[in-house]
Image (cartoon, rainbow, N blue to C red):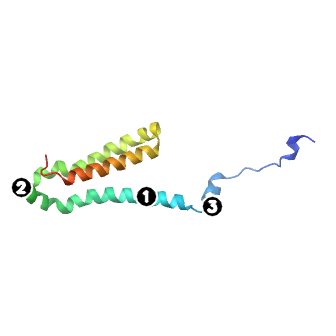
Amino acid sequence: MTSSAQIPAVANRDVQAFINAQPLSRYQWRIVLLCFLIVFLDGLDTAAMGFIASALTQDWGSDRASLGPVMSAALIGMVFGALGSGPLADRFGRKLVLVVAVFLFGLFSLLSARTGSAT
């Protein structure tokens, strides 16, 4: 008997259905939670600007028009991040790009808290 006779014939299997039937592991839930927190904090950062705009104009002694660039900076940053993160992730890996992006987001958030004017 040949070795090929010992291997049972396997019918075509639906890999997508197999993956969908498996429960999420603790590791996968942790990744989902971390990604949710990243998106939540990014959205919170953008939404907070709308709430503190009047306090900033008083604290900085400026008019509302000077807050235009400040209010749009986060959205412009998101555009460049969305356009650039895909190709960078393909080249350097998704994990590294995500870690660097979160690090830079945190660093610039801390630095922006120390500013005293829109410029």
Residue type for callout 3: Ala
Q: Nearer the viewer, residue 95 or 39?
A: 95
Q: Secondary structure at mark 1?
A: helix
| Image spot of residue 87 (x, y percent) | 42, 38
104 left or right of 28?
Answer: left
Q: Is residue 86 above or below residue 41?
A: above
**Mark 1 vs mark 2, CA separation in Å:** 38 Å
Q: Provide the residue designation for mark 3.
A: 21
* Marks 1,2: beta carbons within 8 A: no
Residue type for callout 2: Gly
86 left or right of 64?
Answer: right
Q: Secondary structure at mark 2?
A: loop
Mark 3 burial class by Cα count in 10 Å: few <14, some 14-19, many 20+: few
Earlier in the chain: of badge 1 and badge 2, it is 1
Figure label count:
3
Residue type for callout 1: Leu
* Marks 2,3: beta carbons within 8 A: no
| Image spot of residue 73 (x, y percent) | 23, 48
Residue 61: mark? 2
